[in-house]
Amino acid sequence: MTEHSTGQDTNRDDGATITVSTLTSLSQIAPETWDACACPETADGGRPYDPFTTHRFLKALEDSGSVGARSCWDPHYLMAERDGQVVAVAPLYLKSHSRGEYIFDHNWAHAYERAGGRYYPKLQIAVPFTPATGRRFLTRPGFETEGVSALIQGAVQMAADNELSSLHVTFCTEDEAIAGERIGLMRRVTQQFHWINRGYADFDGFLGSLSSRKRKAIRKERQQANAFGGTIETLTGDAIRSEDWDSFWRFYQDTGARKWGTPYLTRQFFDIAQDTLRDDIALVMCRRDGRDVAGALNFIGRDVLFGRYWGCVEHHPFLHFEACYYRAIDFAIERGLARVEAGAQGEHKLARGYLPAPTHSLHWVGDRGFARAIERYLEAERAAVDEDIEILTAFGPFRKANQEEQQ
């Protein structure tokens, strides 16, 4: 793919321009320079809103070989500079498939190729394998408007100059989706299930907000899960041991083989995570008879716990729900986190207190006729998703007064 720089008019009073270029490795930019755009909120010493766009997380994907040529997630990170200062960055990848994205465009690809076009390769602004909402156009404070505009224009120009079919920005924030739509990208709305912390003092406080039948069902599930004959621990930071990743790798391989055929992350990713990401991680481990039998991996944001992976080598009733959903709620209440995002899909989460929430993406397609067809589809899809969220929320497990509050 042709690499280039492109000047973008920022429309500032001083008439300065922002120049957008690409990096093929995060080794080409200092961690503090990237993070000044990705997580400026950490200047107060706190956590990033989410860890997934930090230099350390994206570099772990790169250094472990989880992204790169063989994965078909080929890095072309965007970097926008003004007067020699980096003011905005974005995790951009060249892709030859649509796996690991969780906002699906397979039908678009099939239709595009049936019409005689070549859909792949395409460009993707995303955190690979991570269906978690967060900023995708990462700007220094004070450069939000022109930084986002420059990154979008630079990415679209790159796609057009290289005659690529499309550009996709997945799991961006709602504000970014609105801004991108104003610039000319197509906005898509999908949904996930999130648990919201209403200031509960403990898990029983959460249960008290549910209908009697759902409250009893969850208590029964937790009782059966915790009677599996072992112990369950939630580990973070230095409490996580290197050998825990040996066990979790077995769990992850089992899940990956069943869901995707081949696990997305390499074994080395977890070794790097132990060195550079363990303070960002809450690892739930289930042990029985001296053996690790199941586990769930979560990442900790400033206000959100992000559920990511689950796996097991033994099946026990409701242990999945306990490790993935109920222990996540326990952790969020204990840490005062506002929300748990439980990952992609899964209407079974509804009965466990996780309500539907909209997620957002942006799309650009070079072929204008095909773009118009997609735009009509997205308009109808948004209406259907809005209706689905309303219906599912009404069928949630909360008592009537609490349901009205949730809606």
Image (cartoon, rainbow, N blue to C red):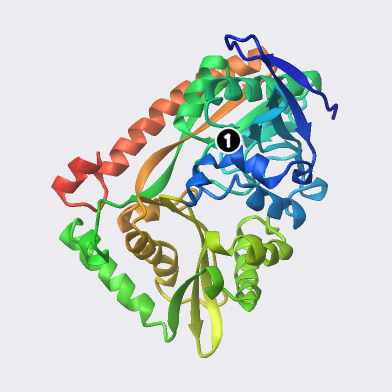
Circle 1: residue type? Arg
- The image quadrant of residue 380 is top left
| Most foreground residue, 63 or 143 | 143
Which residue position is annotated with label 1? 136
Which residue is depicted at the point 51% across and 48% down?
48
Horizontal placement of 193 versus 201: left or right? right
Q: List x then y, in percent, for residue 354.
A: 35, 52
Q: List x then y, in percent, for residue 171.
A: 53, 38
Horizontal placement of 199 versus 58: left or right? left
Position of the N terminus by quadrant: top right
- The image quadrant of residue 201 is bottom left
Looking at the picture, does residue 287 appear above or below residue 393?
below
| Most foreground residue, 243 or 42 | 42
Which residue is depicted at the point 52% across and 19% down?
181
Q: List x then y, in percent, for residue 125.
A: 64, 35
At mark 1, the secondary structure is loop
Residue 286 visible, this orientation: yes
Which residue is depicted at the point 53% across and 31% down?
141
